[in-house]
Amino acid sequence: MSKKVLTVFVFAMLALSLGGYRVYRYYTSRVPNETEYQRLVVPKAIQLYEMDFTGKSDQPVKKYKILPAKSVVLVAVNEWASHDDLGDLRKLKGYDGKDNIYAEEIIGNYLPESMVNAHGSGRLMYYQIFPLSVYNEIPGKIKTCIAAYFHEHDFQRTKEYQFTAIADRAAKVMAYGDFTGDNGQDMAVLLENKDKTGSRLLIFHVDKSQECHVIFTTDLSGLFIIKSLKKGSRVFMNDYNLESAPLDGIIIKDKENKYAIIYDSDYKSFRQHYQYSDQEINELKETQQKLEDDVTDTVESSY
């Protein structure tokens, strides 16, 4: 058996032994036992991870240290570890005297383009999809589903829709809940178009078999924010009276409008319900009262 085949086989077995973590290691060098390194001065602080490929640890990937900005390191260009939640982590040579320290995926963005092209992993780069650390909180299963959606629609290349890169806004483009009422894990995300003039709302659902699907999508004019709506919260649904939300849902709003998006179990679809402001309710009540008064006056004048 050749060295290359043996290497792939050994690490495939290690990947399987890690179970739910799904950590993989690949070599793309022509000579698998020789790792190529590039000296790099990192422009920004970067998270480091300590990897355990033995299959004996219950924590095969652990946060290690923050690599300070302006640090000088040797980064492997043809050796990395791929992780469902974290993307492709690049190996560092002899960091702290260790041989198992890897840097978060964004470090690959600072390598010479010619090297990245020559030793690319063929995967979507997570740091291009999830540009801020707050997105690290997204559950791994849904994160993988989002990456697949980006790949399917070629967003990484076209930039047609992206996650916001504004830190203060990032937490307001994600919402969680059991939106379909089946005790599953659901997440809503808002993407913004490249012109920053429109939004796309997506709802991802993880079913009982742990498969993830996009179950709702709609495009909106303008930039919105969202938050979770809990089951039982009071919302406007069918008229001007507040009702208890039958399921978890989403509140989506901009400067002028506010909507509740709630799953309709009877029609198996999401429905959008306009949420009235106090001023609008008062105006509606005044209009309704005026109409009732006009009807009363008309009836009395007929006698």
Image (cartoon, rainbow, N blue to C red):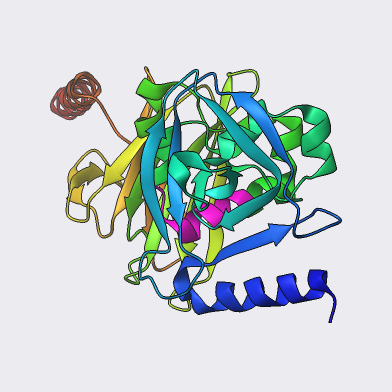
Q: Residue furthest bottom?
A: 1
The stretch drawn in magenta includes residue 142: yes
Residue 124 vs 17, above or below: the answer is above
Above or below, 159 against 211 in this view is above
Residue at figure coordinates x 58%, y 42% from the top left: 93
Is residue 160 left or right of 294 when viewed as pictured? Answer: right
Is residue 123 toward the left or the right of residue 287 in the image? Answer: right
Q: Is residue 17 visible?
A: yes
Residue in the foreground of this view, choosing between 140 and 232: 140
Position of residue 227 in the picture relative to residue 204 (left or right): left
- Residue under the image location 27 percent in, 29 percent down: 276
Report if residue 259 is visible in the image. no
Spot the residue most to the front. 97
Residue 6 in picture, x, y percent from top left: 75, 76
**Rendered-image quadrant of the N terminus:** bottom right
Question: How far across and down, in percent of the image, does residue 42 sit?
Answer: 55, 23
Q: Is residue 20 left or right of residue 245?
A: right
Above or below: residue 208 compared with residue 104: below
Which of these two is toward me, 100 or 66? Answer: 100
The residue depicted at 50 percent of the width and 53 percent of the height is 100
Span shown in magenta: 137-147
Residue 247 shown in magenta:
no
- Residue placed most toward the observer, 190 or 83: 83
Q: Quadrant of residue 297?
A: top left
Residue 43, image x and y in percent? 54, 18
Q: Number of callouts in the render?
A: 0
The secondary structure making up most of the magenta span is helix
Q: Quadrant of the C terminus?
A: top left
Residue 302 position by quadrant: top left
Residue in view at x 29 percent, y 44 percent: 228
